[in-house]
Structure formats: structure tokens, C-alpha cells
Image (cartoon, rainbow, N blue to C red):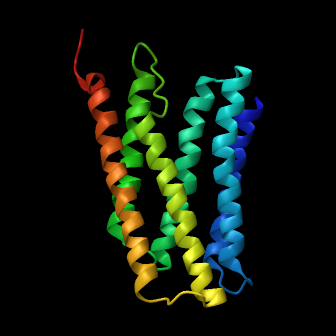
Amino acid sequence: MNLPNKLTLARVAAVPFYVIFMLRNDIPLNFFWALIIFIGASLTDMIDGKIARKRGLVTDLGKFLDPLADKILVSSALICFVDLQWTYSFMVIIIIGREFIVSALRLVAAGNRDHTVIAAGIWGKLKTAATMASVCVISIMHILTENISVLNQDMPVIIISNVLMGICTLLTVISGGIYLKEYRHLFTKSK
């Protein structure tokens, strides 16, 4: 297994630690440590791709694992956000639902006679980057309100969180629609 794929698997391995820190308020500065883990895991997403392209280590396994690792990391963060009442569940359902649809599309593509591997497109990458950035910003706002008391916890945090999550949801719908449109031929019968 090459280095980029190992970094991708490290991103998945970080998820349980992230969830523990997010949901255990008996750990001092738990949101801060969760954010550090999330940022570190998110950086592996950027680093593994650069290494793979620079060293010619792009593989079908990497094309499959990389978006899957992103889905696991981001879905875990968003589910924690719902549990903590930091975001609306309907937005998270749309985001995770799109991930299931695109994953199913990738499985259908891989199973066709050409064994097509669907790599992440620009809209999918934009959606992932926006969601990861939003998770970081929302986490920072909660760290500031709950641990440092810099921000008023009421309106600004709620409004900014909802706007950011709304943008992520919109990008999710757009990128999902583009994937479905681009690969709709996989669902037509041809003999």
C-alpha cells in the first residue's frame, strides 16, 4: 500500500477519536481537541492527493478510498453536530443521503463492463472543502462561546452556523445532481 493510501486510512482511523472528544464533555477542552483531530484528518485529504499526483501514485484504490474517507469523516462530524444541536438534522440527512447516492453510483460504475472508477469531480471537491471548512468554523465558534466566552452564544453563532450549513447543503445538492447527470448512462439498458 502506498503512502497516499496510508494517509487516507489514517483519516478514517482518526474518526473514532474525533467522535469521542466531540461527545464527551467531561474531557477538558473536548471541542478544541476534536477540532485539532478534524483539522489534522482534513489536511491528510489535501496531502495524500498532492503526493499521489506528484509521485505518480494515483491508483484505483486511492480513487475509491479517498472520497470514502471524506464521507466517513464529514458524516461523523455532522452527526455529532446534530447530537449537540449545532445544526438541523434535515441538512445532515440531505448531505449524508447524497453521499449514499454517489457511493451507489460509484459501485454501479465499478460493476459495469468497463469497470469505470468515478473520481471526485470539481463540484464534489468544492462541496467537501466547504463542508470541512464549515465544520472547523462552527467548531471554533462553539469553542469561543463555551470555553472562552468571547462570543454571545445566542444569535450570531446560530445564524452563522445555519448559513454555513445551508451553503454546504446547496453545494451537496448541486454536486450530487451533476454526478447523476454525468453518469446517468450507467442506468440505461444497452445490449
* In-front residue for pair 131/119: 131
Q: Position of residue 78 (x, y in %)?
A: 49, 64
Q: Is residue 98 above or below residue 55?
A: below
- The quadrant of the picture occupied by the N terminus is top right
- The quadrant of the picture occupied by the C terminus is top left
Residue at image position (40%, 46%) is 100
Q: Position of residue 57 (x, y in %)?
A: 70, 23
Q: Is residue 78 above or below residue 180?
A: below
For residue 95, what is the image quadrant? bottom left
* In-front residue for pair 155/96: 155
Q: Is residue 150 above or below residue 5?
A: below
Tell me if residue 87 can be seen: no
Judged left or right of residue 56, residue 131 is: left
For residue 163, what is the image quadrant? bottom left
Residue at image position (40%, 25%) is 109
For residue 50, what is the image quadrant? top right
Tell me if residue 109 can be seen: yes
Judged left or right of residue 78, residue 173 is: left
Q: Position of residue 5 (x, y in %)?
A: 70, 35
* In-front residue for pair 118/36: 36
